[in-house]
Structures are given as C-alpha cells and as structure tokens.
Image (cartoon, helix red, strand yellow):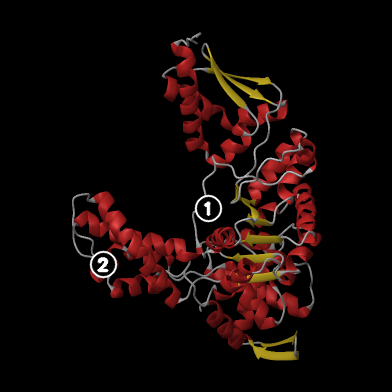
Amino acid sequence: MQETIMDESSIAAPTTLDAIEQELTRKIGSQKFRIWFKDSASITLDDGYLKIGVPNTFTARWIENHFLTELQSVTERVTGQRHKVTFSVTQPPTVNTPTTISAAPRTKSAHPSQATQRPARPRHDASQPRLRLTLDSFVIGQSNELAYNAAQVVIREQHSPFNPLFIHGGYGVGKTHLLQGACNAIRQARPNTQWMYLSAEDFANHFVLALKTKKLEAFRQRMRNTDLLAIDDIHFLANKPSTQEEFLHTFNSINLAGKQVILVSDAAPKQIKQLSDKLVNRFVSGMVVKIDAPDFATRCKICEQCARTMVPTTYKGMMPKTDKTPKVPESVIHFIAQNVRSNVRELEGALLKVIAFSALQNGPITLALAKEVLADHVERCDPVVHLSSIESSVAEYFGTTPAIIHSAKKDKTVAMARHFTMYLVRKHTKMSSSEIGRLMGNKNHATVLVACKKVEDMFKCDAELHWQGPTGNRVSTTKTTLMALENSISK
C-alpha cells in the first residue's frame, strides 16, 4: 500500500491561511469578508507574498483601495513577518448565497437532466450565523403592538394579505428584532419555507458584484426563487437608481409568484428621499406600519426582561467567584424607564451601566446608585425630541403629510406647516439651519432662518392663522398652535 508523505509546509499552509481568513473576518466583518473575499477571491501565501486571486480588475482595485492595510496587518500578525500583497486575475469562483436559511435539505435528483432544468433555490450556508433575535424576547407594548400583530398574520398565513409588510420607525425601537423574530417564527411554523434575510446594503453589494463578474442571472435566481424575502434597512437603496430598478424587478417577481416580502426602514416609504416613485407605490400597496419609541410601561417591561439576563451575566463575568446575584429593584427600573425615553438600545445601555457599577463595588443595586451613575446620562439625553416626531405632529395638525412638507409645494397650508416644522426642529434639536434645510427637501439655510423668524414674529403678536384642513377651513392663533404642537411632540 503506497503512503502519501506530506512535508510540514503543506500541512501548515492551510492552517495559516485559515488563521489569516479568520482574523480578517474579525477585522472587517463577516459580511464584507463574504462578499469581497470568500465569494470573489482566493488567498494564497508564497515566499513572502500574499497573493489575491480575483475574477477581474474591478474587484482587485476595490480590495486594494479598501482592505490593503487590513490584509498587511493581519498577515503580519499571523505569520510574524511582513508580506507583499499582489493581485492576479483568475477564473471567478462560484458565488455563494448570502445569509440564507433553508430548514429542509433537498435530496439530489436521480435524473441529472431534471436537476439542471430546475431553477436554483436558496440554500443554507453553514458558515453564516443563524439569526440571533426571536419573538420570545420581543416585548410587546402600545408602541409596537400593531406591527407585532401584522407580523403574526404573516407568520400564520401562507399567503398573507400584507405584501409587502413595511415596518418603519426610529433608531433602536425594535424593527430588526421584529424582522429577525418573524423569520425565525416562519421557519419554525413552516419548515419547508425557503427564506432569505439580508440588509439592503448586502443586496446592493451582491448586485454590483454580480454585474462586475457577469453573474447577474445567478444573482437574480438566488434573490427571486424564495418564498420569503426579508430586507433590513431598505432606505439604504435611496440615491441608487440602478439598484432600485433591480430590486423593483425582484419584488415584482416574488409578489407575482404569491410569495412574501418584509421590509424594514428608518422612515416611511414616502419620506425616503430619492426613492423611485415605482418603489414607493409598491411599498405603500401593502401594510405600512410604524413602531414608535416605547412608552413608560413598555420601557419598564424591557428593563425587567433585560435585567433577568444582564445581572447573572455581568456578575459572573466581572466577579466569577461571587455568589451574589442581586435583583434590580422596581424603583431602579422605574427610574431608568422614566428618564431614558429615546430607544431600547439606550435603555439597555443605562441598565447595564448601573448593574456593572454595582458588580464592581460588590454592593446592592439601589436607587441612589442608579441616580449617581446615570446623572450625566440623564442630563444629556432628556428630553429627546426627534425630527420624525416633529414632522408627524405638524403634518397631522395641519392635515398634510411629512412628504408634502418636504416637497416644493408652496400653497398656504403646506408653507405654514413647513415653517412651523423648521421652527420646532431648530428649537428642539441641535441641528444647524443648513442641516434642517437639507432634510426638509434641500432648502437653503436662509429659507430656514426666514421661516424661524416669521414664526417668532407671529408668536410675539399671537397672529391668527388660517389654513385649509381635511375638514375645511381652520382658524387658530399662533400661541395655541405652538402649544398644541409642543404637547404632541413631548408625548
């Protein structure tokens, strides 16, 4: 029997390359590594050179411009010596699937001809992490109840009436949590469902890569031959007309096949700037639902749920030998929930800070400790008023929409609503007049200053306001209007 003898270098090289790839993944992130290295390049070490095989010069230039420093530092850290990075154009590798889940593996066809005729289906990529967030840990409250119930309909129904389901809201209010939770719940409820979850940035990057590597048809099959397409941060497609056009065709294909699309965004469809009218029309044809910042009761529930996980984990990590795992008193929960109102992430951060200080001092978690630890935090973040809250309140009061306020329309009602919006944003945020003008439809900063001055002058004399609302002519005074708007945005 013949033995195969391998020298040390042939054994060590794969281990070294694996270490380089793992370290590079950690440094640049798994998504970028998957798109620009695993899916489109090969890495080899050869006598002081780190050789990158790429399918075309575009990919070579992109990697050189964006990742050359990381490649050099990672290689030097792993091997202990500096390598020169070189690029060579080779045969493009097979493009792998983006983050995709397929619960039921498919058996191979006994007839190769049948297998080749069948369109490619999304496949599970074992190298990708499973979706982390589930609905079991999603706290339901008044601010997100409608979005949660809409997601439940999509989970229960094979063909839901909400297509697409478009969920929007501010930062850190639980949009991604609900999206990932819905995907996991659908997988559990209908194991044979083929579904795909990815961000809009991933979609755009894979589309660009498919164009450059001339694998557009393979990209389209992967994106469109799925029962559920879940896209996070869809507003990322703004100002990308070619990608928007591709996504429009992807959406139409899935929708016409009776399949489901779930989208998540920081803004409502009509508020996303430079988004094509065709896409906006598709998005608003389904169920558009907003998740607001959590109210006090919901914030308390979130704190209580997080505390059950944070306390044991934090104490164990910082004090491995301690037997103490104190509970977070209700007074501390209420204090944090009352003073941190903007979003869930900030709420969790404040709670973790209190628990960590308690663990460091090896003492109880008390209200006095919470007040001391969060003094600067509370002063800095309270009160918080967001641009979206101001726009929504003003639009509702004057009987219009934020999209129309942002438009170039100059009729009396829209102009009045625009002036009050600019005035309140200038008063309640730290945004400059140039920033406000840009967000209000690319208006000049001087337009913002004039609008604010006009509202101030009307307030001084409490001028009477007349405008056309949905129910007819409306009349009010400036002070009454501002008081009503202030009360609305402070809720």
Which residue is drawn at the image coordinates 20% and 64% (left, top)? 364
- The part of the image, by quadrant, that contains residue 206 is top right
Q: Which residue is mark 1?
A: 131
- Give percent across and percent down for residue 381: 43, 65
Which residue is drawn at the image coordinates 64% and 45% (left, top)? 123
Q: Residue type at mark 1? A: Leu
368 lies above or below 357: below
**Front in this rendered view, residue 335 or 460:** 335
Which residue is drawn at the image coordinates 70% and 61% (left, top)? 260
Q: Which disc, if any, is residue 323?
A: none
Is residue 82 something that shows in the picture?
Answer: no
- The part of the image, by quadrant, that contains residue 235 is bottom right
Is residue 123 something that shows in the picture?
Answer: yes
Q: Residue type at mark 2? A: Lys
- Left/right placement of residue 163 relative to residue 141 reads right
Give the Cα separation between the discs numbered 2 and 1.
29 Å
- Give percent across and percent down for residue 116: 78, 38
Which residue is drawn at the image coordinates 60% and 57% (left, top)? 191
